Image (cartoon, helix red, strand yellow):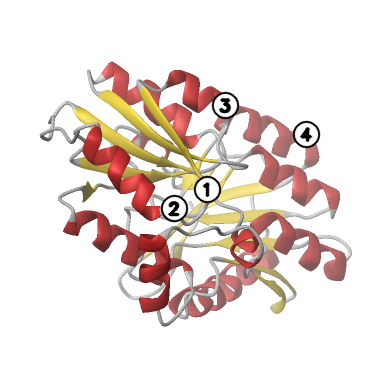
Amino acid sequence: MSKSINPNNIGIIAGGGQFPLLFIEAAHKAGRRVVVVAHKGETDEKVALAADAVCWVKLGQLGKLISFFIAEGVGETVFLGTITKTRIFRDILPDLKGISLWNKIDRKQDDAILRAIANALEAEGIVVLESTLYLRHLLFPAGVITRKRPTQKQRRDIEFGWHNARAIGKLDIGQCVVVRNCTVLAVEAIDGTDATILRGGALAKEQAVVVKVRKPGQDFRFDLPATGLTTIRSLQRVRGAVLAVEAGQSLLFDKELMIEEANKAGIVVVGVAEREDGSLVME
């Protein structure tokens, strides 16, 4: 039996990683009851244990997701965590509502898919909120956060990579590029940031510069760029030199551990801001 909306309830559509668990902790501190839709093969069991109510779904089971939220009286939800994008080619098992929505989406790309799901939820009276609700302190800080600072040559690579990353973001291809000597070595696609770093770093041999930005017009409700300890470890594997991330527009996980690891490896980590005239600030 369906329930009326309880304004104290908040839903989470959870993927992988620690973001859903961090959100649950913050939402509980804010006095919210947390209702989670967890994805099999993606969401950590700890997320389910921390939730006040949970429903496990397979990728594409939109009808099951909506029915659960309605039954639990959820009127607000957030998208949190990662979904392995390559799974859409092998593991998606949509229900009737999921199939209907999928067939209406012309471009099977991140923004188009997520916006379509958000619109379907809101048509059922479930409002999709910004993913950074309660967790804005996780946004990437501005300036150099490591001991080592970028050289002039690396600054040129950052500027070059920035404009290329913006261009692929505008096309909704990805959010990250790997460059060296003002040459693009790898562009993020469906394989994700870490795989992009490994591909580009292998071509660079060493001293690769990784630039990660928010897509133009990025909706803060979903798919924000994110970096963390695993990003630095991917850079270490290819003897990379720099990680430059758009400040205030990206999530940073495990900040202290990430900085410690970067300092040990001599990797520069910098939060970059863009002025209205298009110039970049790296201090």
Q: Nearer the viewer, residue 63 or 221?
A: 63
Residue 218: image quadrant is bottom left
Q: Which residue is mark 2?
A: 61
Q: Would residue 216 appear left or right of 242 to someone viewing this image? A: left
Can you say which quadrant of the picture contains the N terminus? top left
Q: Residues within 10 Å of mark 2 (few under 14, many from 20)?
A: some
> Tag 2 or tag 3, which sits nearer the N-term?
3
Q: Are marks 2 and 1 in contact (CB under 8 Å)?
A: yes
**Residue for point 84% across, 68% down:** 204
Q: Which residue is mark 3?
A: 45
Q: Would residue 162 appear left or right of 146 to someone viewing this image? A: left
Indicate the amino acid at tag 4.
Answer: Lys
Q: Nearer the viewer, residue 102 or 135?
A: 102
How far across and down, in percent of the image, does residue 209 sit?
Answer: 70, 62
Q: Would residue 57 appear left or right of 13 to someone viewing this image? A: right
Q: Residues within 10 Å of mark 3 (few under 14, many from 20)?
A: few
Q: Which residue is mark 1?
A: 58
Q: Are marks 3 and 2 in contact (CB under 8 Å)?
A: no
Q: Nearer the viewer, residue 258 or 270?
A: 258
Q: Are marks 3 and 4 in contact (CB under 8 Å)?
A: no
> Tag 1 or tag 4, which sits nearer the N-term?
1
In the rendered image of this protein, does residue 47 appear above or below residue 234? above
> Tag 4 or tag 2, which sits nearer the N-term?
2
**Residue for point 52% across, 48% down:** 58
What is the C-alpha distance between the residues marked 1 and 3?
A: 15 Å
In the rendered image of this protein, does residue 126 appear above or below residue 88? above
What is the C-alpha distance between the residues marked 2 and 4?
A: 44 Å
Q: Are marks 2 and 4 in contact (CB under 8 Å)?
A: no
Q: Which residue is mark 4?
A: 264
Count of marks placed on residues: 4
Indicate the amino acid at tag 1.
Answer: Lys
